[in-house]
Image (tube, grey):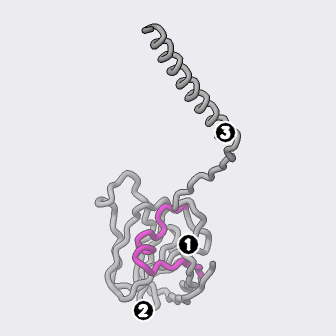
Amino acid sequence: MMFNRIRRAQSSFTRLYRNRAMAVVGLTLFVALTAVPISAEPIVPPWRIELPWTSHTALVTVGDTQIIAEIADTGDLRSRGLSFRDGLKSGHGMIFIFDDASPRSFWMRGMRFCLDIIWIEGDQIVGAAENACPEPGVSEQDLARYRSPEPVSYVLEMPAGWLDEHGYRPGTPVTIQMARADR
């Protein structure tokens, strides 16, 4: 009698194990045969997305040279600036627009190329930090700060050497035509 109980328990266990194994195999086959292949696109980090990051540009004329400048007129746009980019197209730059003339300080956080940082007030260049370059491996608190020589309302960033190439200096006239939506 004990032998029959053991045999029935083994038989129940075997049936339960076999049923579970068949359920797992069946579920696996169902998923494998009905699954739709999914193709995933890699996530592109923000600094690799096609530029510009803002849709507003201004036509800036420095001396007799016209530039298409992306407008950085909000805290977020000014903070990001040209960081994480690999460069600028020829004839392009970024214009930082402030509500009032104040002393300005810029740094090269997240930059990958050198710049001419041009301070503008009263429709003319009042100074520049020429050939300001990234400082790889330097902590943020130790990065060089480039300060305007006087309070300014506008700051234009162009590729390094642009000022020297065109011969522009303090006193060169600047005009800024706003509100051009490109995209």
User: Which of the marked residues, 1 or 3, is nearer the chain's N terminus?
Assistant: 3
Which residue lies at the image location 33% right of the left edge and 61% below the top edge?
143
Q: Which residue is mark 2?
A: 122
Disc 3 marks which amino acid? Phe
Q: Nearer the viewer, residue 59 or 99?
A: 99
User: Which of the marked residues, 3 or 2, is nearer the chain's N terminus?
Assistant: 3
Q: CA distance from mark 1 to mark 3?
A: 69 Å
Which residue lies at the image location 43% right of the left edge and 9% below the top edge?
2
Q: Is residue 164 visible?
A: no
Up-down: is 90 above or below 3? below
**Magenta residue span:** 66-86
Q: Nearer the viewer, mark 1 or mark 3?
A: 3
Q: Is residue 47 magenta?
A: no
**Any mark on residue 30, and which?**
3
Q: Nearer the viewer, residue 1 or 80?
A: 1
Q: Nearer the viewer, mark 3 or mark 2?
A: 3
Up-down: is 19 above or below 59? above
Q: Position of residue 59 (x, y in %)?
A: 58, 85
Q: Which residue is mark 1?
A: 165
Which residue lies at the image location 53% right of the left edge and 88% below the top edge?
176
